[in-house]
Amino acid sequence: MTLDFNHTPSFADRVNETVDAALTAENATRTPRDYLGGSRLGHACERALQFEFTATPKDAGQDFSGQVLRIFAIGHELEELAIRWLRGAGFDLYTQKGNRPDGGQFGFEVARGRIRGHVDGILAAGPEGFGLAFPALWECKTMNAKNWRACVKDGVAKSKPVYAAQIAVYQAYMEAQVPGISANPAMFTAINKDTAELYHELVPFDAELAQRMSDRGVRILGATDAGELLPRVAANRDFFECRFCSWAERCWGLPT
Ligand code: SF4
Protein backbone atom coordinates (compact mmCIF):
# COMPACT_ATOMS: atom_id res chain seq x y z
CA MET A 1 0.00 0.00 0.00
CA THR A 2 1.26 3.47 -0.85
CA LEU A 3 0.59 6.14 1.73
CA ASP A 4 -0.53 9.44 0.24
CA PHE A 5 0.92 12.11 2.50
CA ASN A 6 -0.17 14.84 0.11
CA HIS A 7 -3.83 13.92 0.04
CA THR A 8 -5.83 16.92 -1.13
CA PRO A 9 -9.47 16.87 -0.09
CA SER A 10 -11.72 16.41 -3.09
CA PHE A 11 -14.47 18.84 -4.05
CA ALA A 12 -16.97 16.44 -2.44
CA ASP A 13 -14.94 16.18 0.77
CA ARG A 14 -14.78 19.95 1.12
CA VAL A 15 -18.48 20.52 0.48
CA ASN A 16 -19.40 17.68 2.83
CA GLU A 17 -17.18 19.03 5.57
CA THR A 18 -18.77 22.46 5.19
CA VAL A 19 -22.28 20.99 5.42
CA ASP A 20 -21.28 18.89 8.44
CA ALA A 21 -19.72 21.88 10.16
CA ALA A 22 -22.92 23.92 9.66
CA LEU A 23 -25.10 21.08 10.97
CA THR A 24 -22.99 20.40 14.04
CA ALA A 25 -22.70 24.13 14.79
CA GLU A 26 -26.49 24.48 14.58
CA ASN A 27 -26.95 21.44 16.80
CA ALA A 28 -24.53 22.87 19.37
CA THR A 29 -26.84 25.88 19.83
CA ARG A 30 -29.74 23.65 20.93
CA THR A 31 -30.54 23.63 24.61
CA PRO A 32 -30.02 20.12 25.99
CA ARG A 33 -33.12 18.36 27.26
CA ASP A 34 -33.70 18.77 30.95
CA TYR A 35 -36.18 15.92 31.20
CA LEU A 36 -36.27 12.19 30.77
CA GLY A 37 -37.73 11.35 27.38
CA GLY A 38 -40.71 9.00 27.60
CA SER A 39 -39.56 7.53 24.30
CA ARG A 40 -36.30 6.45 25.91
CA LEU A 41 -37.62 4.64 28.98
CA GLY A 42 -37.28 1.24 27.32
CA HIS A 43 -33.54 1.67 26.76
CA ALA A 44 -31.62 -1.34 28.05
CA CYS A 45 -29.45 0.56 30.54
CA GLU A 46 -30.80 2.66 33.41
CA ARG A 47 -27.39 4.19 34.02
CA ALA A 48 -27.21 5.38 30.40
CA LEU A 49 -30.66 6.92 30.86
CA GLN A 50 -29.35 8.73 33.94
CA PHE A 51 -26.44 10.13 31.94
CA GLU A 52 -28.92 11.19 29.26
CA PHE A 53 -31.32 12.78 31.75
CA THR A 54 -28.58 14.76 33.50
CA ALA A 55 -27.06 15.87 30.14
CA THR A 56 -23.75 14.38 31.27
CA PRO A 57 -21.10 15.27 28.66
CA LYS A 58 -20.54 12.43 26.22
CA ASP A 59 -17.14 10.79 25.78
CA ALA A 60 -14.72 12.47 23.38
CA GLY A 61 -15.82 12.01 19.77
CA GLN A 62 -19.32 10.86 20.75
CA ASP A 63 -21.24 14.02 19.93
CA PHE A 64 -23.62 13.68 16.98
CA SER A 65 -21.79 13.89 13.66
CA GLY A 66 -23.20 15.67 10.64
CA GLN A 67 -24.18 12.30 9.20
CA VAL A 68 -26.12 11.28 12.32
CA LEU A 69 -27.89 14.65 12.36
CA ARG A 70 -28.86 14.10 8.71
CA ILE A 71 -30.22 10.66 9.56
CA PHE A 72 -32.43 12.24 12.24
CA ALA A 73 -33.58 14.97 9.84
CA ILE A 74 -34.40 12.50 7.07
CA GLY A 75 -36.41 10.41 9.54
CA HIS A 76 -38.37 13.50 10.49
CA GLU A 77 -39.12 14.37 6.86
CA LEU A 78 -40.18 10.79 6.10
CA GLU A 79 -42.59 10.96 9.00
CA GLU A 80 -44.16 14.04 7.42
CA LEU A 81 -44.58 12.06 4.21
CA ALA A 82 -46.19 9.16 6.09
CA ILE A 83 -48.68 11.61 7.57
CA ARG A 84 -49.63 12.77 4.07
CA TRP A 85 -49.87 9.22 2.76
CA LEU A 86 -52.11 8.07 5.60
CA ARG A 87 -54.36 11.11 5.33
CA GLY A 88 -54.57 10.55 1.58
CA ALA A 89 -55.71 6.99 2.28
CA GLY A 90 -58.55 8.21 4.49
CA PHE A 91 -57.01 8.12 7.97
CA ASP A 92 -58.10 11.08 10.07
CA LEU A 93 -54.75 11.71 11.67
CA TYR A 94 -54.16 14.60 14.05
CA THR A 95 -50.58 15.62 14.62
CA GLN A 96 -51.11 19.05 16.17
CA LYS A 97 -53.53 20.15 18.82
CA GLY A 98 -56.55 21.40 16.93
CA ASN A 99 -54.66 20.25 13.79
CA ARG A 100 -53.34 23.77 13.33
CA PRO A 101 -49.65 24.23 12.56
CA ASP A 102 -49.39 26.52 15.59
CA GLY A 103 -51.36 24.20 17.86
CA GLY A 104 -48.31 22.37 19.16
CA GLN A 105 -47.58 18.68 19.22
CA PHE A 106 -49.62 16.37 21.43
CA GLY A 107 -47.65 15.29 24.41
CA PHE A 108 -47.55 14.73 28.15
CA GLU A 109 -45.58 15.79 31.18
CA VAL A 110 -45.45 13.81 34.40
CA ALA A 111 -43.32 13.87 37.55
CA ARG A 112 -43.47 17.69 37.60
CA GLY A 113 -42.36 17.86 33.98
CA ARG A 114 -39.30 15.68 34.52
CA ILE A 115 -40.66 12.94 32.25
CA ARG A 116 -42.11 14.12 28.96
CA GLY A 117 -43.09 12.75 25.61
CA HIS A 118 -44.27 14.07 22.26
CA VAL A 119 -46.75 12.06 20.29
CA ASP A 120 -46.43 11.55 16.53
CA GLY A 121 -50.17 11.57 16.05
CA ILE A 122 -53.62 10.52 17.14
CA LEU A 123 -56.05 8.75 14.83
CA ALA A 124 -59.61 10.00 15.22
CA ALA A 125 -61.13 7.94 12.41
CA GLY A 126 -60.08 5.77 9.50
CA PRO A 127 -61.25 3.50 6.73
CA GLU A 128 -63.56 0.62 7.65
CA GLY A 129 -62.40 -2.94 7.86
CA PHE A 130 -59.05 -2.63 9.58
CA GLY A 131 -60.14 -3.46 13.11
CA LEU A 132 -59.17 0.01 14.27
CA ALA A 133 -60.87 1.67 17.21
CA PHE A 134 -60.59 5.36 17.96
CA PRO A 135 -58.95 7.37 19.38
CA ALA A 136 -55.73 5.50 18.65
CA LEU A 137 -52.13 6.50 19.18
CA TRP A 138 -50.04 6.67 16.00
CA GLU A 139 -46.30 6.15 16.20
CA CYS A 140 -44.00 6.26 13.17
CA LYS A 141 -40.38 5.13 12.85
CA THR A 142 -37.95 4.92 9.97
CA MET A 143 -35.52 2.01 9.73
CA ASN A 144 -32.85 0.61 7.49
CA ALA A 145 -33.83 -2.46 5.46
CA LYS A 146 -32.37 -4.98 7.93
CA ASN A 147 -34.20 -3.55 10.95
CA TRP A 148 -37.38 -3.06 8.96
CA ARG A 149 -37.39 -6.71 7.83
CA ALA A 150 -36.85 -7.84 11.43
CA CYS A 151 -39.79 -5.68 12.46
CA VAL A 152 -42.02 -7.18 9.77
CA LYS A 153 -40.95 -10.70 10.69
CA ASP A 154 -41.15 -10.51 14.49
CA GLY A 155 -43.35 -7.50 15.23
CA VAL A 156 -42.45 -4.36 17.10
CA ALA A 157 -42.52 -5.79 20.64
CA LYS A 158 -39.89 -8.42 19.90
CA SER A 159 -37.74 -6.63 17.32
CA LYS A 160 -37.84 -3.14 18.81
CA PRO A 161 -38.65 -3.34 22.52
CA VAL A 162 -37.69 0.33 23.03
CA TYR A 163 -40.43 1.37 20.61
CA ALA A 164 -42.93 -1.02 22.22
CA ALA A 165 -42.13 0.52 25.61
CA GLN A 166 -42.60 4.01 24.16
CA ILE A 167 -45.99 3.09 22.75
CA ALA A 168 -47.18 1.58 26.06
CA VAL A 169 -45.95 4.58 28.08
CA TYR A 170 -47.53 7.07 25.67
CA GLN A 171 -50.85 5.23 25.65
CA ALA A 172 -50.86 5.27 29.46
CA TYR A 173 -49.82 8.90 29.90
CA MET A 174 -52.06 10.27 27.12
CA GLU A 175 -55.18 8.66 28.60
CA ALA A 176 -55.87 11.69 30.83
CA GLN A 177 -55.94 14.03 27.79
CA VAL A 178 -57.42 11.63 25.25
CA PRO A 179 -59.82 9.32 27.09
CA GLY A 180 -59.99 5.88 25.49
CA ILE A 181 -56.56 6.00 23.85
CA SER A 182 -55.20 3.25 26.09
CA ALA A 183 -58.19 1.00 25.49
CA ASN A 184 -57.54 0.91 21.74
CA PRO A 185 -54.58 -0.61 19.94
CA ALA A 186 -52.00 1.91 18.70
CA MET A 187 -51.10 1.96 15.03
CA PHE A 188 -47.38 1.62 14.42
CA THR A 189 -45.90 2.62 11.05
CA ALA A 190 -42.37 1.62 10.03
CA ILE A 191 -40.83 3.03 6.86
CA ASN A 192 -38.02 1.17 5.15
CA LYS A 193 -35.55 3.95 4.35
CA ASP A 194 -33.82 1.85 1.68
CA THR A 195 -36.85 0.67 -0.27
CA ALA A 196 -39.73 2.98 0.77
CA GLU A 197 -41.75 -0.09 1.80
CA LEU A 198 -44.26 0.43 4.59
CA TYR A 199 -45.16 -1.78 7.52
CA HIS A 200 -48.12 -1.25 9.83
CA GLU A 201 -49.01 -3.03 13.02
CA LEU A 202 -51.76 -2.72 15.58
CA VAL A 203 -50.21 -2.70 19.05
CA PRO A 204 -52.60 -3.47 21.93
CA PHE A 205 -51.99 -1.61 25.18
CA ASP A 206 -49.56 -3.47 27.41
CA ALA A 207 -50.43 -2.16 30.87
CA GLU A 208 -47.76 -4.24 32.60
CA LEU A 209 -45.06 -2.84 30.30
CA ALA A 210 -46.30 0.72 30.81
CA GLN A 211 -46.20 0.26 34.59
CA ARG A 212 -42.71 -1.24 34.48
CA MET A 213 -41.45 1.68 32.38
CA SER A 214 -43.15 4.22 34.61
CA ASP A 215 -41.52 2.59 37.69
CA ARG A 216 -38.23 2.78 35.86
CA GLY A 217 -38.65 6.49 35.28
CA VAL A 218 -39.38 7.01 38.99
CA ARG A 219 -36.30 4.95 39.90
CA ILE A 220 -34.06 7.00 37.59
CA LEU A 221 -35.35 10.31 38.94
CA GLY A 222 -35.06 9.10 42.55
CA ALA A 223 -31.50 7.81 42.16
CA THR A 224 -30.44 11.01 40.38
CA ASP A 225 -31.93 13.16 43.14
CA ALA A 226 -30.09 11.07 45.71
CA GLY A 227 -26.81 11.45 43.78
CA GLU A 228 -26.63 7.72 43.18
CA LEU A 229 -25.58 6.02 39.98
CA LEU A 230 -27.75 3.08 39.01
CA PRO A 231 -26.05 -0.24 38.18
CA ARG A 232 -24.54 -0.92 34.79
CA VAL A 233 -26.58 -3.04 32.40
CA ALA A 234 -23.68 -5.46 31.97
CA ALA A 235 -20.74 -6.97 33.81
CA ASN A 236 -18.49 -6.59 30.81
CA ARG A 237 -17.61 -3.63 28.63
CA ASP A 238 -17.89 -5.79 25.51
CA PHE A 239 -21.66 -5.96 26.01
CA PHE A 240 -23.55 -4.84 22.92
CA GLU A 241 -25.15 -1.75 24.51
CA CYS A 242 -21.84 -0.62 26.00
CA ARG A 243 -20.05 -0.82 22.67
CA PHE A 244 -22.47 1.75 21.28
CA CYS A 245 -22.84 3.86 24.43
CA SER A 246 -21.77 7.50 24.33
CA TRP A 247 -20.66 7.35 27.99
CA ALA A 248 -18.74 4.04 27.92
CA GLU A 249 -15.37 5.62 28.82
CA ARG A 250 -16.86 7.53 31.72
CA CYS A 251 -18.96 4.59 32.90
CA TRP A 252 -16.25 1.94 32.84
CA GLY A 253 -13.72 4.37 34.28
CA LEU A 254 -15.77 4.48 37.49
CA PRO A 255 -15.06 1.99 40.30
CA THR A 256 -18.52 0.41 40.10
S1 SF4 B 1 -21.35 1.81 29.11
FE1 SF4 B 1 -22.86 0.19 29.29
S2 SF4 B 1 -23.32 0.05 31.47
FE2 SF4 B 1 -22.31 2.02 31.13
S3 SF4 B 1 -23.94 3.49 30.83
FE3 SF4 B 1 -23.33 2.78 28.80
S4 SF4 B 1 -24.71 1.06 28.36
FE4 SF4 B 1 -24.82 1.45 30.56
Image (cartoon, helix red, strand yellow):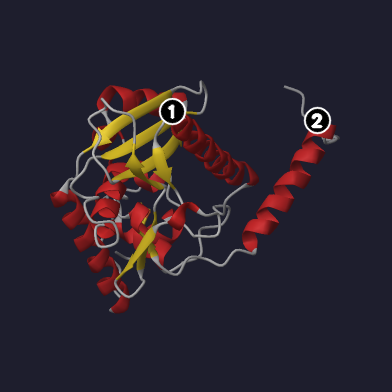
Q: Residue furthest left?
A: 208
Q: Is residue 99 left or right of residue 41?
A: right
Measured as percent of width and height from the top left, residue 46 is found at 29, 58
Q: Is residue 48 above or below residue 34?
A: above
Q: Specify the label residue 89 is tagged with.
A: 1
Instruction: Give the quadrant of the N terminus.
Output: top right
| Rendered image quadrant of residue 25 | bottom right
Cα distance in 3D space between marks 1 and 2: 55 Å
Closer to the N terminus: mark 1 or mark 2? 2
Measured as percent of width and height from the top left, residue 102 is found at 55, 59
At label 2, which amino acid type do we have?
Asp
- Ligand 1 image position (quadrant): bottom left
| Rendered image quadrant of residue 158 | top left
Measured as percent of width and height from the top left, residue 233 is found at 27, 52
Residue 75 visible: yes
Categorize mark 2 by other alpha carbons within 10 Å: few (<14), some (14-19), many (20+): few
| Rendered image quadrant of residue 5 | top right
Q: Secondary structure at mark 1?
A: loop
Q: Which residue is mark 2?
A: 4
Measured as percent of width and height from the top left, residue 20 is found at 70, 46
At label 1, which amino acid type do we have?
Ala
